Amino acid sequence: MIEFYHSPARVAWTPTGTNVPDYPRLAQLWWKNVATAVTGEKTPQAAMDNLAKEMDDVMTRLERAGMKNCPPKLNKTYYPNKWLSDASAPWKKLANEKPKGETIQYDKLLQAWKEGRVR
């Protein structure tokens, strides 16, 4: 991702260059909130909820300020149950988030790929 922001290819994808409104301000929110999860000060869920709220606040201000190119357009705020009830992502947490791994021979996986199968 960082390579994209530094490469000339970014201008082929968006008129805003990095395509992240005020990337430096949003990036500092990311690191601040990740740190609270890493240190155990907050649960990962609480840290990400706080990050989302802080990013929404910044982007709401940018939206109101009237950016010239591709201003952020935020969705209405809903409770998680509304988003998780939709047929598309994000999905509810699985009962078993970490199933036991399975080893499959590489040749079999490669053959399945060539045939357009999952396995």
Image (spheres, rainbow, N blue to C red):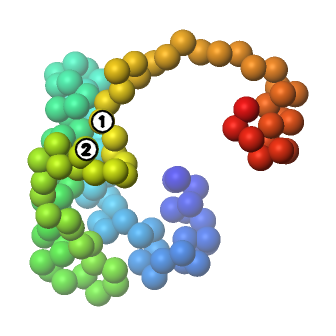
Residue that badge 1 annotates: 92
Q: Residue at x 17, y 58 (%)?
A: 56
Q: Inspect the image, locate mark 1, and give the three-letter code of the amino acid beneath it.
A: Lys
Image quadrant occupied by the C terminus: top right
Across and down, in percent, residue 83 comes to 23, 49
SS category of the residue bearing label 1:
loop
The answer to whether the residues at label 1 and label 2 have Cβ atoms under 8 Å apart is yes
Residue 33 quadrant: top left
Across and down, in percent, residue 102 comes to 65, 16
Across and down, in percent, residue 112 comes to 80, 37
Q: Is residue 78 above or below residue 93?
A: below
Given residues 63 and 81, the one toward you in this image is 81
Q: Is residue 28 visible?
A: no
Compute the Cα span from label 1 to label 2: 6 Å
Please report whichever mark, 1 or 2, sits nearer to the chain's N-terminal start. 2
Task: Decide if residue 75 is on the left or right side of residue 109.
Answer: left
Q: Residues within 10 Å of mark 2 (few under 14, many from 20)?
A: some
Residue that badge 2 annotates: 84
Residue 42 quadrant: top left
SS category of the residue bearing label 2:
helix
Q: Is residue 22 above or below residue 35?
A: below
Q: Residues within 10 Å of mark 1 (few under 14, many from 20)?
A: few
Q: Inspect the image, locate mark 2, and give the three-letter code of the amino acid beneath it.
A: Leu
